[in-house]
């Protein structure tokens, strides 16, 4: 029951959010992702869209010759 009271309070009054902290963490995360993408491209030798299933399949199955 105590938990319910806390949740109702949060729902009606809201909670404090560190907007500067969130913005800083977001920028740090974006930079880390760019670093990982750069590392990936350096290791495979060309630019690849890591979100593209087709490009990843081509790389692993055709370029690298790995059988599915």
Image: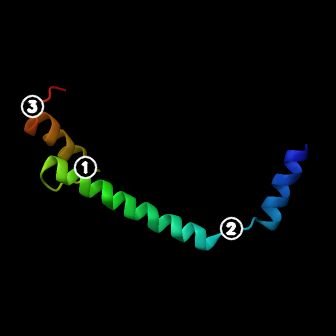
Tag nearer the camera, 2 or 1: 2
Rounded to the nearest angstrom, the CA distance separating label 2 from label 3 is 49 Å
Mark toward the start of the polypeptide (2 vs 3): 2
Q: Nearer the viewer, mark 1 or mark 3?
A: 3
What's the CA distance linking mark 1 and mark 3? 18 Å
Q: Which residue is mark 1?
A: 52
**Badges 1 and 3: C-beta atoms under 8 Å apart?**
no
Quarter of the image containing the C terminus? top left
Give 60 or 29, whichever is nearer the viewer.
29
Q: Is residue 6 left or right of residue 43?
A: right
At label 2, counting other C-alpha atoms closer than 10 Å, the crowd grade (few under 14, some 14-19, many 20 or more) is few
Residue tagged 3: 65
Mark 2 and mark 1 lie on one chain; the one further toward the N terminus is: 2
Residue 56 at x, y percent in the picture: 21, 43
* Quarter location, residue 58: top left
What residue is shown at x 86% (from left), y 47% (from top)? Answer: 4
Residue at horizontal 82 percent and vertical 67 percent from the top = 13
Q: Are marks 2 and 1 in contact (CB under 8 Å)?
A: no
Q: Quadrant of residue 11?
A: bottom right
Q: Is residue 64 above or below residue 53?
A: above
Q: In the rendered view, does 36 fall on the left or right side of 28?
A: left
Residue ID for mark 2: 17
- Relative height, residue 55 to residue 11 (above, below): above
Residue at the (52%, 69%) spot, across then down: 24
């Amino acid at each position: 029951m105590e938990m319910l009271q806390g949740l109702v309070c949060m729902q009606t009054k809201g909670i404090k959010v560190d907007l500067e902290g969130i913005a800083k963490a977001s920028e740090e995360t974006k930079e880390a992702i760019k670093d990982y993408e750069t590392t990936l491209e350096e290791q495979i030798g060309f630019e690849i869209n890591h979100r593209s299933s087709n490009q990843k399949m081509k790389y692993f199955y055709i370029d690298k010759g790995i059988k599915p």
